[in-house]
Image (cartoon, rainbow, N blue to C red):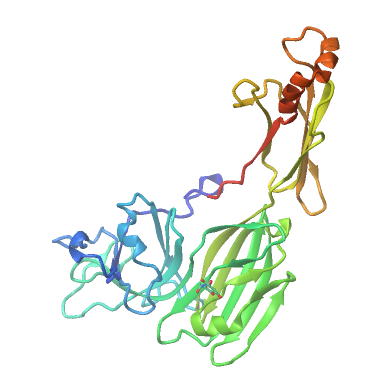
Amino acid sequence: GVGLGGVALFTRTPSTLVLRDVPVGLDESLDTLTPFVPPLVPDPDLLLFETKVSSSPDIPNAEVLLHADCNEQEVTCEISRYTPRGLQESSDPAYFMVFLSVEGLDFSMSLILQTLSVEKHQPALIQKKLSLPLSSSGTLQTKGIFLVFSNKKSVLAPLRGDILLNCGFKQEEVPLGADVGVEWRLQHRGKGHKVLEMKKNLDDTKGTVLHGERKGSSMDAAQLASQGNVSMSLTQLKVADEGTYICTVSVGRFHAQQVIQLHIYQPPQVSLSDEKLKTSQTLSCHSRKYYPLDAQMQWFYLSPSDSKEQLFPDQGSLSSHRQHGDGTYSLSSYLTVVNHPVLDSPVDVIIVVESPQLDSYWFVLGFLIITVLFFYQVIK
Ligand SMILES: *[C@@H]1O[C@H](CO)[C@@H](O)[C@H](O)[C@H]1NC(C)=O
């Protein structure tokens, strides 16, 4: 990566993360899975991280990783050096932060790995980039000690509705510390603020909310202690609640986070100014109080000959967006329906309108179908 003025901030190197003992479904044969085979001759240039999933803490939903590749779901994995609070950068053991997520699946986690000591019976090969001793098979042996996960990367919720933003943590059986700190932040359009913060001693029954900025935000202290569930619930959602939520969990010297996008939506209330057209006139279609802004209005009509829906050739004019106090928008479209194309003067229209047979034509036209295409902002 390159920062301001072309200064290299960090470099990326291809590496491999080997997760051993991933649980396999009951109906699945081990023969269908390709095991990882380390290179015959250990290579000090290669970066091979190896960790056991079954050793505590277990990785929730790790089985989705088994077939992600075959199912063409992109797996994102980033590993970086991690320094626990209060420790030296070159501490022994060494720590790494793994960010792992699978596209299209609700699987995302940040996992902290700790290196395991290498059997001392022979001089170990040293990994060149990290200067860390490798196992006899040329891998960096690690164990997961702390992870923060979320089963949803992006959620869509209706305005004035309620939502639970999912976040959980797991730690080694040997507790890393009895005090757990949870912080939920909201980041939106370059601005950020703390939404909710809780501290909890795991031996204690109660959690202490240190900070609750938003009315209607809450976290369950009992679930935090019993299941490591630090999901935050938000009630009466407002447009201002939209944005990127960051769930940070700290235990002892360790902390990790997960990011969840919250999108708010509100479908429009659509109405026409008139149900029937009597004479040449301007029809208005109002689309009220919707969110987000991306909206498009189109006029369609039912062709009298075959009752097929067709795009009306004249798309009229659009008002500008109006924004309401609650952040929703309104938009109107105006269409002037002059007369029937086969009639050559407006005078005929009046006659036509009053003729009973053609009334049905106007009735059809009066049924101009308004379709408001309401595009949700696509979730990344
Ligand atoms: C937390 O608890 C809620 C139900 O209370 C559940 O829906 C959610 O999946 C749990 N999340 C985690 C991360 O355990």
Q: Residue at x 36, y 77 (%)?
A: 93
Q: Residue furthest top?
A: 344
- The image quarter containing residue 184 is bottom right
- The image quarter containing residue 300 is top right
Q: Residue at x 22, y 61 (%)?
A: 33
Where in the figure is residue 151, as x and y percent of width and height?
48, 65
Relative to 117, is 200 on the left or the right? Answer: right
354 and 341: which one is in front? 354
Residue 129 seen anywhere in this rendered image of the structure: no
Q: Residue at x 33, y 51 (%)?
A: 71
Where in the figure is residue 95, as x and y percent of width and height?
40, 72
Q: Residue at x 36, y 67 (%)?
A: 62
The answer to whether residue 35 is above or below residue 116 is above
Residue 44 seen anywhere in this rendered image of the structure: yes
284 and 181: which one is in front? 284
- The image quarter containing residue 144 is bottom left
Relative to 202, is 372 on the left or the right? Answer: right
The answer to whether residue 307 is above or below residue 294 is above
Q: Residue furthest left?
A: 40
Where in the figure is residue 240, as x and y percent of width and height?
72, 57
Q: Residue furthest front?
A: 356
Where in the figure is residue 212, as x and y percent of width and height?
71, 74
Total marks in image: 0
